[in-house]
Image: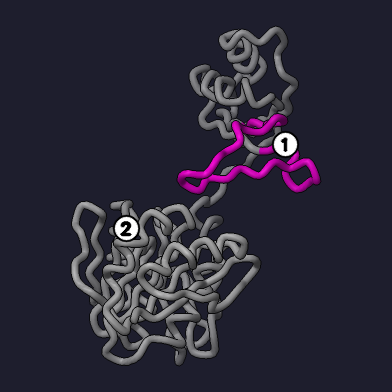
Amino acid sequence: MAWQNVTLLSDAEHADPLCDALMEAGALSASIEDADAGTPDEQPQFGEPGSVTTPGWQRSRIVALFEPDADVAAIVGEAAANIGLAAVPEWRSEPLEEQNWVQLTQSQFDPIRVSGRLWIVPSWHESPDPAAINLILDPGMAFGTGSHPTTRLCLEWLEREVQPGDSLLDYGCGSGILAIAGARLGAARVAGVDIDPQAVQAARDNAERNGVTALFADSAEPVAGEYDLVVANILSNPLRVLAPAICAHVRSGGRLALSGILREQAEEIIGIYASWLPLAIADVREDWVCLAGRKP
C-alpha cells in the first residue's frame, strides 16, 4: 500500500506552527517549500551565516507524509484547530509508492569530469576513465559532491598549482574532496579542518577510500603550522571573520585560494585580505569567483 503524500498552503506566519502541529497529530514528516518556486514570484532564502534572512515564504507549501491508512482529513483539522486557525487549509493527497530511497538518492549523482585527467566518482559508480585521477567520493552528511561551481573552481586551481611535495591545508574541508584532490595531484603533507565533526569523519572515510594519508580535525583540534597551499571554499561571511587565521597558515611565498564568493563580493574580500596578501580573481563560474594570491 502506498504512503500518502499531502500538500497544503499556508502563509509565513503559520507555516512552522502548522508543520509542528501536523507532526504532533500523526504526520511522519513535514517540510516547508516556496509555493512560488520556479516562478517570477519566487522568494530566495539566504542562509549564509551573518546574513539577513527573510522570515519564510508568504505563500508556503507544506509537504507532509502519512501512513497509508492515516485519516488525513482528521489530522489536518486537528492540527489547524491546535494552532488557532479559523478554517482548515485546503489540502490534497497523492499516493507515494515505496521505493529504494538509497538507490534513488544515489542515482542523482553521476561521475563528474573536472578536466582531462581529473574525475569525481561517487563510491557507488564505476569510473568512466580508469586511467584518470579518480576521486572516489561519498559525501555522507558533509557538504561537497564536486558539482557546485565553487568546488569546481577550487579543483581547477589545485590542478594548476599543486607541485610534487607541496603541503596543503583545506580550511573548511567538508567531504574532504579538495584535500584528497591535492594529495592525488602530488601534495605530500595534507590536512583539513572543519567545524562539523560529521564532515571530519566523512573526510577521513573518503581519504581512506582514495588511499590518501591526510590529517582531518575539527575546530576543537586546531591545525598548526604553515603550508605551501591553503584553500578555503566556504562562504564570504566566514571568510571575512577567519581572514587572520586562514592567512596565518600560508607560509611566506605560499599560495592561497578562496571560494564560496559571489562576483559582487570579490572586491570587499580582496580588500580585507590585502593586510596579509594580495588577492585577485583567478576564475569565474556562474557568478561565483575564485580569488587567489601569493603571500609575500
Q: Which of marks 1 and 2 is in front?
A: 2
Q: What element carries label 2?
A: strand
Q: Which mark is residue 150?
A: none
Q: Which mark is residue 194?
A: 2
Q: What stretch is highlighted in magenta?
A: 34-63
- Side (left or right) of 204 relative to 137: left
Question: Based on the displayed image, in which of its 4 quarters is residue 162 positioned?
Answer: bottom left
- Side (left or right) of 268 relative to 167: right
Q: How far apart are marks 1 and 2 (CA)?
A: 34 Å
The magenta stretch spans residue 35? yes
Q: Nearer the viewer, residue 130 or 205?
A: 205
User: Disc 1 designates what residue?
Assistant: 35
The image shows residue 90 at horizontal and vertical percentages of: 75, 21
**Type of amino acid at the residue the image marks with label 1:** Ala
Q: Quadrant of the N terminus?
A: top right
Q: Which of 291 and 86 is in front in this view?
A: 291
Q: Can residue 221 be seen in this view?
A: yes
- Side (left or right) of 66 relative to 216: right
The image shows residue 290 at horizontal and vertical percentages of: 52, 72
Q: Residue at x 61, y 8 (%)?
A: 84
**Type of amino acid at the residue the image marks with label 2:** Asp
Question: Based on the displayed image, in which of its 4 quarters is residue 36 positioned?
Answer: top right
The magenta stretch spans residue 66? no
Mark 1–mark 2 CB contact (< 8 Å): no
Q: Residue at x 68, y 38 (%)?
A: 34
Q: Name the N-terminal-most of marks 1 and 2.
A: 1
The image shows residue 213 at horizontal and vertical percentages of: 23, 76
Q: Is mark 1 on a helix, strand or loop?
A: loop
